[in-house]
Image (cartoon, helix red, strand yellow):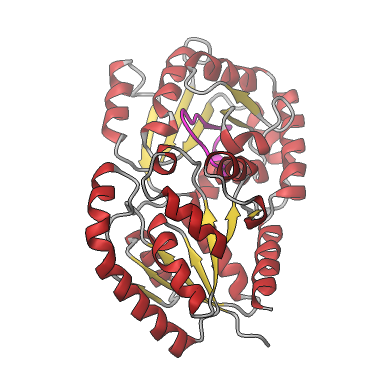
Amino acid sequence: MTNRNVLILKFPYSSLFGGGEQHTLNLVEGLRKRGFSFFLISSCSVLLREFQNRNWPCKKIWAPKEPVAKGSVILFPFLAPYFLVRLFLLLIIYIANYRIKILYCFSLTEKILITLPARILGIKVVWIEHVTVERWLTLNPFKIFYRFYSHFAKIVAISEAIRKQLIEEIKINPKRILVIYNGVNLPPANFHDFKSRVNKKGFIVGVIARLEREKGIEYLLRAIEIVKEIIPQIKLIVVGEGSQKKNLQWLARSININNLVQFVGFQENIKGWIRNFDALVLPSAKRESFGIVLIETMANLRPVIASRIGGITEIIEDKKTGLLVEPANSEELAQAIIYLYNHPQEVLQIIKQARVKVESSFTKEQMINAFEKLFITLLR
């Protein structure tokens, strides 16, 4: 069998657990069962911890902050030469010891530093793009390097929205970009479970997201303030951590809904929480590259409400597989929640069609198959 050893690099601006990290764990887990071996070199404490918990080979090294903010952009030219030398030497060691054939790059740091050296050493390079293209790249002085080195890599975008941005805003060659959607496992379809929840008194809305400004949680809190006048027994469960947690807790108190809102922090068992929700909301205010929590929820037969933004519109067709609302609009969010509460029969049809959508386009098996095909093609 052809050598199938892949080295993952990730040197981000900050360490957080999000869709990109979950995607990586799913990918590694799936491809390991098909004869691939993965190694991780990273400064990301979150991903390193997940690899260590699974006894997957990984190594932590220092890296300069990813040059996506003013301070890190200024410092990067001074720190990058030292880091490049160290990373290049590590790459040679890994090639010699583990016969690495593919380099899988997450962050801007490794993409602009190690792509060309890796190609010179005979290693195929894959870039994964999880994040929508915004000022961090469009106005970045290192954008020219990103564009140049993209000629030496295969780029995987997790949505058509990201692919379109890369082509139109960064001028990447369309032939270099492949769209591979995120995928999830399919639990058994038990529609009786949904029907049994319809007659209960409470109505639990959930949100699973990093608690950052772009996720728009504040607009959901204000929507709950509106909804409580129509559905007094409404409850909101906020799953996730982030820099805005204290501000959001303060907002909940200031608008007198703190008794209706529960902040439960980061949770490992996301599926368990989803099954306790009557609906999931993803109220992204500025950007959303895809929204893996949406397809996880749809697979588990719960209705979803999300902002009409980015890759979300590739998942949700309004009133057919979920409800779409305008970003940063508390009134629309409130009306969408009230609609789900008042129309259980329509919701049943929505979750049935949503499940079909996941089965046809967003399964973990389909994602693994697509990456396996890509890697095998690169190894030829």
Residue at 50% of width from left, 50% of height from top?
A: 19
Residue at 61% of width from left, 85% of height from top?
A: 3
Residue at 36% of width from left, 76% of height from top?
A: 88
In screen coordinates, is 240 left or right of 368?
Answer: left
In screen coordinates, is 120 left or right of 367?
Answer: left
Range of magenta residues: 276-291
When the figure is inspected, residue 3 is found, relative to residue 103, above or below; the finding is: below
Residue 236 in picture, x, y percent from top left: 45, 29
Please indicate, yes or no, whether residue 245 appears anywhere in the rendered image.
Answer: yes
Residue 258 in picture, x, y percent from top left: 33, 24
Residue at 71% of width from left, 25% of height from top?
A: 319
Quadrant assignment, res 217: top left
Q: Is residue 102 magenta?
A: no
Q: Is residue 285 magenta?
A: yes
Please indicate, yes or no, whether residue 268 appears anywhere in the rendered image.
Answer: no
Farthest-out residue, top = 229
When the figure is inspected, residue 101 is found, relative to residue 210, above or below; the finding is: below
Residue 33 in picture, x, y percent from top left: 63, 75
